[in-house]
Image: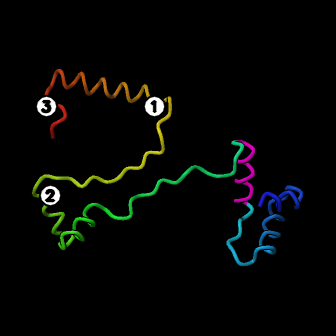
Amino acid sequence: MLLIYGECESKAKSAAMLYRERFPEGPHPTRQTILKVIKRLREKGFVTSRPRVRRPRKSSTKMISENCGLAKSHVWTILNESGAHPYRFTPVQGLLPRDAERHYTRCNFVMNNLDDHPTFLQI
């Protein structure tokens, strides 16, 4: 894509059309896609975007229902009656240095409240 962009004298629309002609069978980048790639290369020094975070393919309730031969609704009923919670996976892109102060403040808040009110975290 970058070579074709260079051949077209840095014209994204022409590069998109030439790419479509040379590679008719595959997906074709739009003018906007080419411009985004060029911008990322200039700003960051590389073309690839950030790695994607993917969810697990099966939820815990689905795995339990398949392993035990129970309906998913029955698994939910059992979990609810026993007070268990099948927590959802929450992807975190990464912690940044600026996040440290906020997390430290939150931890201190919880610790101080636990000292004053022992049942602070109980539901």
Q: Is residue 73 left or right of residue 48?
A: left
Position of residue 94 relative to residue 83, above or below, is above
**Residue beneath label 3, please?**
119
Residue at 48% in and 41% down:
94
- Amino acid at dot 3: Thr
Q: In the structure shown, which secondary structural element does the residue marked by tag 2 occupy? A: helix
In the picture of the structure, the residue carrying the numbered disc 1 is: 99
Percent position (x, y) of residue 20? 77, 73
SS assignment for the magenta stretch, majority: helix
Judging by the rendered image, the residue that carries numbered circle 2 is 80
- Which quadrant would the N terminus be assigned to in this image? bottom right
Please say if the residues under marks 2 and 3 sit with CB atoms less than 8 Å apart: no
- Local packing at callout 1 (Cα closer than 10 Å; few below 14, some 14-19, many 20+) is few
Question: Mark 2: few, some, or many residues within 10 Å (few <14, many ≥20)?
Answer: few
Q: Earlier in the sequence, mark 1 or mark 3?
A: 1
Q: CA distance from mark 2 to mark 1?
A: 34 Å
Rendering coords of residue 65 (x, y %): 22, 69
Inspect the magenta stretch and tell me whether residue 73 lies in it: no
Residue 40 placement, left or right of 5: left
Residue placed at 43% from the left, 45% from the top? 92
Q: Is residue 89 left or right of residue 23?
A: left
Q: Earlier in the sequence, mark 2 or mark 3?
A: 2
